[in-house]
Image (cartoon, grey):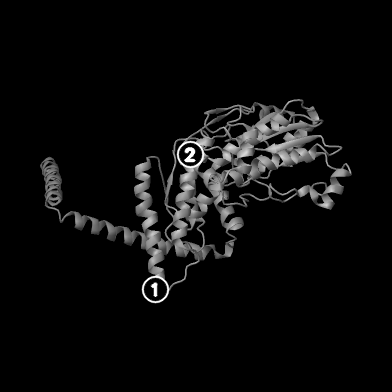
Amino acid sequence: MDNVIYWAALGGVDFFHCQHHQKFAQGGQVSIVFHVAATLKFNEALKIAVEQNVLSVIRLMDICDRLPNIEAFIHVSTAYCNAELSTIEERVYPPPASLDRLLAVAESMPNDLMTDITPKYIAPKPNTYTFTKAMAEFAVQQHGNKGYSIAIFRPTIVISAVKHPFPGWIENLNGPSGVIAAIGKGLLHVFRCNSMAYADLLPVDIAIDTLLAVAWETATDKLQDVRVYNCTTSENPTRWGDFENAVIKNIKLYPMDKALWWPYGTAIHNKYLEKILELLLQTVPLHLTEYISRLLGIKTQLNLITVSHRLQAMNKVLKFFALREWRFVNTNVQKLRTRLTPQDAAIYNLDPKSFKWEEHYLNFVKGIRKYLLKEKDQDLAKARQHVKRMFYLHTCVSVLLMGLVIRLALQNKLVRDLFYGSMKFILSIFNKQLFNWNRKTV
């Protein structure tokens, strides 16, 4: 790590002005540059997304042009920058808009007008994140080789580590990790996805190891054209239904501290059913709990109404990716894997078949509890007791509500007649079967 230096800055800041970094670069010590900066908000304002996802790449490549001993530039993109396609090849696709026009629009157009035109402007891209990442790839291709090789690295959905630095290690709440944390805290109960669709979840340590190997190959091969690497776990597939079942199972084994409610969740494909269940199981309970807490003078750590809105926003953003599946061609990554010596392969894990999903999902849940929520293992027994009480409360409330619904329904004469008629019919069938059984045994 002594030979690695990083710049932490917003894409709009000329971070090359730092005197220390200037001396480091001009001294000829920089040979490989990774561009990993980006806004990960899928619904980010287009102007901000352009600044951080597109202009940051262009500016950094301009800096690289001035480095005397640079050998390779690696731009970290996303496998979903062409999400409107069902098959994603390892190549740069035509840009969804003119790059020069996009930069001009982002610089000069008022924010309110930009917000109004964004949905049509970025179509067919589902959000500003994938749109600007696609534009950044085109900017990289347009820049091309100017004395150093360039590659684009596309990971799929990055999740917790298999092994390094620790099993289950994760540091952000984006995507699936946010879903697990929300379910574990008893906040999220309905998630819209296609349970049968393949979920291309990529452990972060495999992604990083592959990225480092990509940098080595890019510098070694002296590429004239931009090479693209799709980093995927399609060779070791898992489905969203597997994710759902494993999360619910493991959260009950390793519950989160001070869960608001019994941690349960269900994946719904139908949008109308999802909206109904979201309203009944999530939105209404969270709002009622917040209002009751205010009336009783109880202070909650989070504003539950705000939490409800954020959960709805998360569901809205993630459903595009959870309802579909893609085929990612990863020929370049497979070839790269074969070039590693046994000694290198023992250090850099590029093999998505090197782990089992059942074990990894367990470590994923444990990792979120430990590394993201900072919860201690010695508090696990207390968390289990708390969740057990939440289960009893959940069961009692469910029975009471079901009884109330049935009682209200029976107030209607048509429903009452239908209910009692059905009960008489069922009892008559049961009595008939019992009579026939008695005759046979006599």
Is residue 353 visible in the rendered image? The answer is no
Quarter of the image containing the C terminus? Answer: top left
Instruction: Classify residue 109 as left or right of residue 241.
Output: right
Q: Residue at x 80, y 36 (%)?
A: 65
- 294 displayed left or right of 153: left
Q: Nearer the viewer, residue 343 or 39?
A: 39
Picture residue at 59% right of the left edge, 63% below the top: 376
Between the C-alphas of marks 2 and 1, the distance is: 40 Å
Choose top left, top right, bottom left or bottom right for residue 210.
top right
Local packing at callout 2 (Cα closer than 10 Å; few below 14, some 14-19, many 20+) is: some
Task: Please identify the quarter of the rendering in which residue 57 is found.
Answer: top right
Q: Residue furthest right?
A: 27
Give residue 93's position: percent from left, percent from top: 61, 27
Measuring from the top left, give residue 411's x and y in whole percent. 15, 56
Count of residue discs: 2
Q: Can you tell which mark lies on residue 320? A: 2
Closer to the chain start, of discs 2 and 1, is 1
Q: Which residue is mark 1?
A: 296
Q: Nearer the viewer, residue 14 or 42?
A: 14
Q: Can residue 363 be seen at all in this image of the molecule?
A: yes
Q: Which amino acid type is shown beneath numbered disc 2?
A: Phe
Residue 274 is marked as: none
- Residue type at numbered disc 1: Leu
Q: Residues within 10 Å of mark 1 (few under 14, many from 20)?
A: few
Q: Give the SS element for disc 2.
A: helix
Residue 85 lies, in percent from the top left, at 53, 29
Name the residue: 36% across, 49% down: 277
Secondary structure at badge 1 equals helix
Question: Compared to 400, does 334 lie above or below?
Answer: above
Q: Where is residue 408 shown, x and y percent of the image?
A: 20, 57
Above/below status of 36 relative to 287: above
